[in-house]
Amino acid sequence: MKKNNVLNDIDKRILSVLQENADLPISELSKKVNLSATPCWARINKLYKQGFITKKVAVVDRLKLNLNVVAFVQVKTSNHNMEWARKFVKVISDMPEVIEFYRLSGSIDYLLKVLVPSIEKYDEFYKKLTDKVDLTDVSSSFSMEEIKQTSSLPLDYA
């Protein structure tokens, strides 16, 4: 990381507050971080330009959208060539039920976090997935309880 991209304590406080409520008016945000409004606004713009803030989004309640089932799907493949990987990434990217997608080290090749309304809808998702791409093994675990879910990143390591 470049020296000019190092976060100071004020920048970290700004990011901490924005991660909790990005709609906070600049007047309130500046009070929370003990800075006047104009320098606070300038720091926020700097954080955007440096790529620390990439976008603002609305966090939507999945239960209000009838997305009651959270599935963690572990995928194994015997195909590790780039052509297969590109196809797999495209297939998964086109499936809106997949909200997180990771390539892993270890015995599992990929991990998907999938949101659907019901087990029946998960079965439809599963069939669609396995029809579109060759997989060696697909194993699913269903969340029984959501204990912690946050979009706030830890700032202690910056």
Image (cartoon, rainbow, N blue to C red):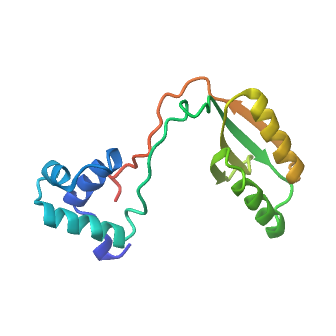
Residue nearer the viewer, 33 or 78: 33
Q: Is residue 149 above or below residue 19?
A: above
Q: Residue at x 83, y 63 (%)?
A: 84
Q: Residue at x 15, y 66 (%)?
A: 39
Residue nearer the viewer, 12 or 35: 35
Q: Quadrant of the C terminus?
A: bottom left
149 left or right of 32 in image = right
Q: Position of residue 121 (x, y in %)?
A: 76, 33
Q: Position of residue 156 (x, y in %)?
A: 32, 52
Q: Position of residue 155 (x, y in %)?
A: 33, 52
Q: Residue at x 67, y 53 (%)?
A: 105
Q: Residue at x 72, y 50 (%)?
A: 95
Q: How many numbered badges does the structure rendering display?
A: 0
Q: Quadrant of the N terminus?
A: bottom left
Quadrant of the rendered image containing residue 83: bottom right
Q: Is residue 24 above or below residue 82?
A: above
Quadrant of the rendered image containing residue 59: top left
Q: Position of residue 44 (x, y in %)?
A: 27, 64
Q: Is residue 146 above or below residue 99?
A: above
145 left or right of 44 in image = right
